[in-house]
Image (spheres, rainbow, N blue to C red):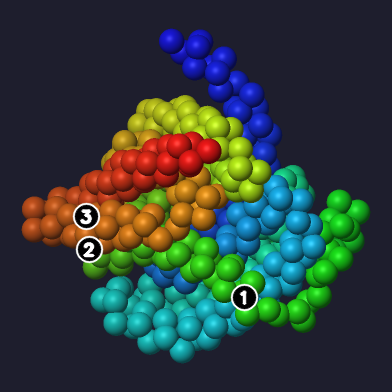
Amino acid sequence: MFSKIYTKYKPYYKENLHLALPIVGSQVGHTLVHMADSIIVGHFTDTIQLAAVSLVNSIFMLILVIGLGISYGLTPLIAQENGRQNYDECGKLLSNSLIINICVGIFLYALVQLGIFFVIDHLEQTPEVVRYAKPYLNLLSVSIIPLLIFQTFKQFAEGLGFTKQAMFVSIWGNAINIILGIIFVKGMFGIESMGVSGVGLSTLIDRILMATVMCFYVLRSQHFKKYLISFKATFFDKIRAIKIAKIGMPVAMQYSFEISAFSGAAVLIGTIGAVEQAAHQIAISLAAMTYMIASGVASAATIKTGNNFGKKNFDDLRKSAIASYHVILLFMSVTAVVFVLANNIMPFIYTEDAAVIPIAAQLLIIAGFFQLFDGTQVVGLGVLRGVGDVNIPTFITFLAYWVVGIPIGYVLGFHFNLGVNGIWYGLTLGLLTASILLFMRFQNKTKALKVGL
């Protein structure tokens, strides 16, 4: 049976992986920034400052995914227009996306400055954790603007199938981030130790450099010459802006519902204690790494789906999507086994605190169980995004995380006294719900396309 399935989908496996692997490298870059911050702070400072990283990342990612989600609205539109060979429209969409993303970046920066600093004082967190968190959050908020400029040109290039360049930029950017982070946090070469603020400064510098390089690449490369004839940085058209927003806003909401659930979990865990919060940060950083790899596969699925949708090639659209499901099921099965078998070893990557490690090890076992659900739900979102189906999936994500996940996690954690483990059980049920409902939506949507062929 497996040989027949492999033979049937083999061409799609190859196409999808060729497109997905560079995107995976680029997507993982976002997580590596925060993962590197956690490792550097965990080894060169103390548990309190590692807990501050957990608190800030849980809040900041909630803000950041709004911008990332809106930037993702460009990719399926570019893929669809490229499938129709409407190259002139691609340049006009890029112009509008750039203006939208810069405005969104400025708005999100202002949101952090005006709102989050007030909120963070009222989350019942350890006072010392909050004291270290504020300057770190301030630096990260500034980095939103260059990151969204980078995202604009990255999503444009990836929508046209050019995925390797953003990966290389992300790899070099992360190398610079790690080197500067160690120098600033530890205090080297005559620079005074900055503690947790040091990784915030290194992240800001990294994102400015990444935005500059990606912008230069797209605007100068011969690959994009025919697509950029109509591109003007100041060109803004209401109709095209609305078209981008109609996809970007629901995608932002999808990410927000999921990430806010994990952010809410981090805040709940913070009310238990700093040790539990630090353990959560370790486990969620490792789980986020596998999630971002799955997200890269999902992004490739969006591009292939959008391209096939533009060509009205609905048979290839469905087979390619199913191949993406196969790939992610295999990958997440492997990571699930790794998390369960190496749960006592992996926390040492971040810390040697004897109080933190056993709690993080327990959470990694739970993370192993939700790997398959996490991977399949994000691929489902990616495929549906490619055909422009974003509204119902947005409702599904809200239902899964905020009607199922967080409420059940709260009850298990606090009323049944399961603590941090109970909160993670709730998150697992939320991911399971999203995975099942999104797959059902995918089946109905793609079968309907084939019927209409």
Name, please, the residue furthest toward the bottom.
114
Badge number at residue 272? 2
Task: Decide which of 87, 346 is in the foreground and name it.
Answer: 87
Q: Is residue 96 left or right of residue 165?
A: left
- Quadrant position of residue 269: bottom left
CB contact under 8 Å: marks 1 and 2: no
Q: Which residue is mark 3?
A: 404
Mark toward the viewer: 2 or 3: 3
Q: Residue at x 71, y 58 (%)?
A: 156
Q: Which quarter of the rendered picture does the N terminus lie within? A: top left
Q: Which one is earlier in the sequence, the residue at label 1 or at label 2?
A: 1
Q: Is residue 101 left or right of residue 336?
A: right
Q: CA distance from mark 1 to mark 2?
A: 49 Å
Q: Which residue is mark 1?
A: 239
Percent x, y of residue 130: 38, 77
Q: Secondary structure at mark 1?
A: helix
